[in-house]
Every structure is written in structure tokens, then in C-alpha cells.
Image (cartoon, grey):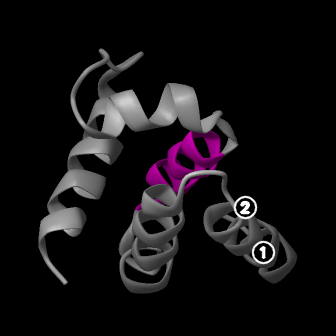
């Protein structure tokens, strides 16, 4: 489970990216859905956020295969959050 300092660091990483679309997507997801994730999903999200935009964006839009089932689950949640405001 992430502590407050980890969440603040994660928030910064979500909203200070090179690609505006990922800023919006990751920032909104963090604010609206992150607290409802299981601890292992939260950690997987934190790992996704560490990825470079050029690696993450293809995952989000379905142009690249996920590395495992947990990453695939998170990408699917991001995709559904992208559609719902």
C-alpha cells in the first residue's frame, strides 16, 4: 500500500508528462479510481506511470501487448476510464 508521500510523487508523475493525453488520462484516473484499486493494482499502476510515454501510449491505445495479466487488467481499467468522464 502506498503512503501519502508515494501518492504525491505518483500524482506529480501522472500529471507532468511529455504527452498531454497521458497527463489527463493518468491524472484523472489517479484522482477518480486509484483509491478503489486493490494494493497489487495500485503497485501495477505505479509501475505503468514509470514507463516512458513512447512505451505507455501504445499500451493504452492497444497497439502493444501487455507484459502480463495484471498490466493488462490495469490497461483495460485505464481504457474504460478514458471513455467515462
Q: Which residue is at the front of the view, 40 or 65?
A: 65
Magenta stretch in the rendered image: 38-49
The answer, for residue 59, to whether it is visible in the render is: yes
Location of mark 1 (residue): 3
Residue nearest the viewer, comparing 34 with 64: 64
Residue 9 falls in image quadrant: bottom right
The tally of labels here is: 2
Tell which circle, 2 or 1, labels the residue nearer the N-terminal end: 1
Residue 5 location, x and y as percent? 86, 77
Question: Which numbered circle lies on residue 77?
Answer: none
Q: Relative to 8, is 51 above or below?
A: above
- In three-dimensional space, the C-alpha distance between marks 2 and 1, rounded to whole angstroms, equals 15 Å
Q: Residue at x 35, y 20 (%)?
A: 66
Any part of residue 71 in sight: no
Q: Quadrant of residue 23?
A: bottom right
Classify residue 22 as left or right of residue 81.
Answer: right
The residue carrying mark 2 is 13
Q: Quadrant of residue 69?
A: top left
Amino acid at each position: 500500500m502506498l503512503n501519502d508521500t508515494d501518492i504525491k510523487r505518483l500524482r506529480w508523475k501522472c500529471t507532468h508528462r511529455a504527452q498531454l493525453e497521458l497527463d489527463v488520462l493518468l491524472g484523472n484516473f489517479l484522482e477518480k479510481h486509484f483509491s478503489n484499486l486493490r494494493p497489487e493494482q495500485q503497485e501495477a499502476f505505479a509501475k505503468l506511470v514509470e514507463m516512458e510515454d513512447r512505451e505507455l501510449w501504445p499500451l493504452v491505445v492497444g497497439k502493444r501487448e501487455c507484459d502480463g495479466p495484471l498490466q493488462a487488467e490495469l490497461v483495460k481499467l485505464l481504457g474504460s476510464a478514458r471513455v467515462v468522464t
